[in-house]
Amino acid sequence: MELYTAHQIAAYMLVNKRSIQIRAKNECWPYTEFKGRGGKVRKYALADLPAHICVQIKEALIKETNSSAAHSGKAYLSVNEQNDRLKNSEITELKDQNLKQLAALESIPPKASAKCWVLKEAENFVSANNLAKVAGFDQYSERYNKGLIDVPVEYRSLIPSVSRITLIRWQKTIAEKGVAGLALKPKRSGKSIIDSDKELADFCIAMIYEYPHVKATQIKEGLIARFYQVGKALPAETTIRDWLTRWKRENSALYTKMANPDAWKNKYMSAMGKMDENVKRLNQLWEFDSTPSDVMLTDGRHSLIGIIDVFSRRAKVVIHPTSDSTGICLVIRKAILDWGIPEIARTDNGKDYTSIQIKSVFDALDIKHETTRPFSGEEKPYIERFFKTFSHDIAELLTGYIGHNVSERQAIEARKTFAQRLLAKQGGDKSAIEINMTAQQLQEFVDNWIENRYHHKPHSNVGNKTPFDLFAASRDQIRVIKDERLLDVMLQPIPTNRGLRTVHKEGIKLSGGFYIAAELGAIVGDEVLCKWDPKNVGRIYVFNRINNEFICIAVDHEIESAGMTRQDVARYAKRSQSAETSRKLKELKKTAKSVNVSDIANEVLGHYTTQNKALSTLPKQSVEHTNVITQSAIKALDSKPAVGFSDEQLSEFEKRRKQLDEETAVANVNPTPLFDNPQSKAMFHKKQRLENQLSDVDALWLNTWEQNNRATSKRLDDLLNDINPAPAATTKLHNQ
């Protein structure tokens, strides 16, 4: 029994050893193991190998003998017979597969039926006229394209023209793949020029990476700019387009990640496990987030600042002009008073959530603060989902709804503008469709929707239970703050430098003043934490920096006696600033009016004009430019129109008129026909030349054509000689 190693088989098949080993493993080739150097060696019996591999090895073995006798012997003939049988079996199998695919189609494509009919008629034409296949297909295609073949209208519309090569290709397809081969779309085989050239492929991939929405036309231009000068063969635009489509299809997840990260998260991002699988109790984890409202209010567009308890899916929302520390503190206060204190607060890493005030609040309440990675909304999915539920559930029905995106917003604005125009045309009040919801009204609406709709709506990812049910069934112990004033103190804003100030012997220096209290005398030199009293800017709350223990309330008596809040101070400062700015602007306006520089540009231009006029230059030597054109122009300017024509001119005109009449008469007697091709035209003029009826223009054309088409011209001359034995006249130009 003949046994061969993977290395030997690879050598006979002209492939590498590894590919044979992989194929043998995947196809489960039978093998026998032998001891060899370095371990065991697998050998394969020739009879156990696939048929086509066996045939290829036998052919290689015969060629190894390098003898004519071997090539003409029985062994070689046997191999050829095996190879033919293998090819025939492959063709039969392919035909069967195509028939199965054709049977799976709902209907046979009309164009396939048309191809079969045209090919059958062509074969009948060749057979009836006893012609060779090539010549017969040529004649048939010529007659078909000229409309001399009777073809059903539906087939003519599908196949308006055909060629010899096309007929031969159809015939070959039927021979190899059966009739079904004409009906099925051929599969792409081989590599494109881009796949075959790593440099081209890398360039195209780089273009996709840098510009995810790049088009085939743009890639083509880039390839030309980069590789044209080095003489590299470049793909056609259609090839690039096909390759681009295939690359996007084969790398759909990667391409989506580059082109649209949000879409990638929704479609491809791994969702194994659950973000709440370790959340087992109330207030274990709160997620925070902010989003602009999809509702325009009378006082502008506001933001929604929300909290969701991951375990129960309860939610709290505060409507605030912007997402800032003040708004976040308001929603924290609202949630803590109703739910208690959370263990963990998860927010994004925006500056509003990582501010000193928010960090101090979390530290004061012993709340662990976790931040997500940048642009990673999937790390707090439940608050994201809550906002989406609200915006798509009921917000779309609110007055002032402006849409979820730019396209929706544009459509809404277009409808509103049209409605306003229509009402105005009909004498109605345009304000009837204007926004009429305030921030307070939206806050009341959102609170009502959360308490009476959202908290009683089953959630599929918590066993179709409602947030109310989960909260009511829980027996978890929660941390609470009973004194609302204590919570207010903790949530107050802090001064700059994280609110840390050193106690001096004069007190605590803050905002240009000194805040004093008797308790501060014992801690002079220590660093403390200060927080503003929101109701009176003249008072601050002082805490121990280490353990956040409350120390005292320090007072700036000058400010405190005025009873001003921080808002009052801010408003007073703005008014003072505005008044001072207005005063300075009035002074500047008065100065500008007195100087009057409104026409300074013309002043500058006038200055330089005056200066340049005073400049003088020496006269330059000059010579008049003249040539034939200038001289002719001078003659034309000096000439006068002729009053009439001389006798000689009139005689010449009459002579030319008679000549034109003669040429017209000859053309009418022997009109030049319309030609289908240059050969027909040349044959016609050759006949005219024999009869001495060729004009100068036609003789010139024929002479040029004969020089450029010597072989065709000789055949035409031979044909004319058969028709007319007299020798053809030599080409010359005839003067008429």
Image (cartoon, helix red, strand yellow):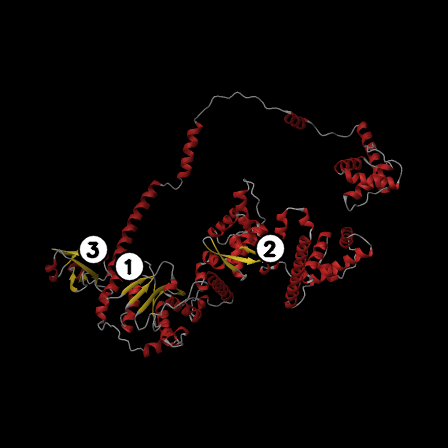
Q: Label 1 vs label 3: CA separation?
A: 20 Å
Q: Examine the image and state in which quarter residue 599 appears.
A: top left
Q: Is residue 316 above or below residue 192?
A: below
Report the quarter where the C terminus lies: top right
Q: Earlier in the sequence, mark 1 or mark 3?
A: 1
Of the numbered discs 3 and 2, the one sitting upstream in the chain is 2
Residue drawn at (27%, 53%) of the image:
577
Residue 242 at x, y percent in the picture:
57, 54
Left or right: 486, with 247 as reference point: left
Residue 496 in the image: x percent, y percent?
24, 56
Residue located beneath label 2 in the image: 189
Q: Are marks 3 and 2 in contact (CB under 8 Å)?
A: no
Give the camera-side residue of 27 and 202. 27
Q: Which mark is residue 511?
A: 3
Q: Amino acid at mark 1?
A: Ser
Q: Residues within 10 Å of mark 1 (few under 14, many from 20)?
A: some
Judge the density around disc 3: few (<14), some (14-19), many (≥20) Cα neighbours within 10 Å.
Answer: few
Q: Position of residue 17 (x, y in %)?
A: 52, 53
Alpha carbon separation for disc pair 3 and 2:
79 Å
Q: Badge 1 is on which residue?
A: 355
Residue 248 appearing in the image = no
Quadrant in which residue 484 is drawn:
bottom left
Residue 24 coordinates in the image, percent (x, y): 53, 59
The residues tagged by marks 2 and 1 sit, at their Cα atoms, a distance apart of 61 Å
Amino acid on which the number 3 mark rests in the picture: Ser
- What type is the residue that disc 2 sits on? Ser
Of tags 3 and 2, which is closer to the observer? 2
Asked whether 294 or 285 is in front, the reply is 285
Residue visible at 42% across and 35% down in the picture: 605
Mark 1 against mark 3, which lies toward the viewer?
1
The mark nearer the N terminus, 2 or 1, is 2
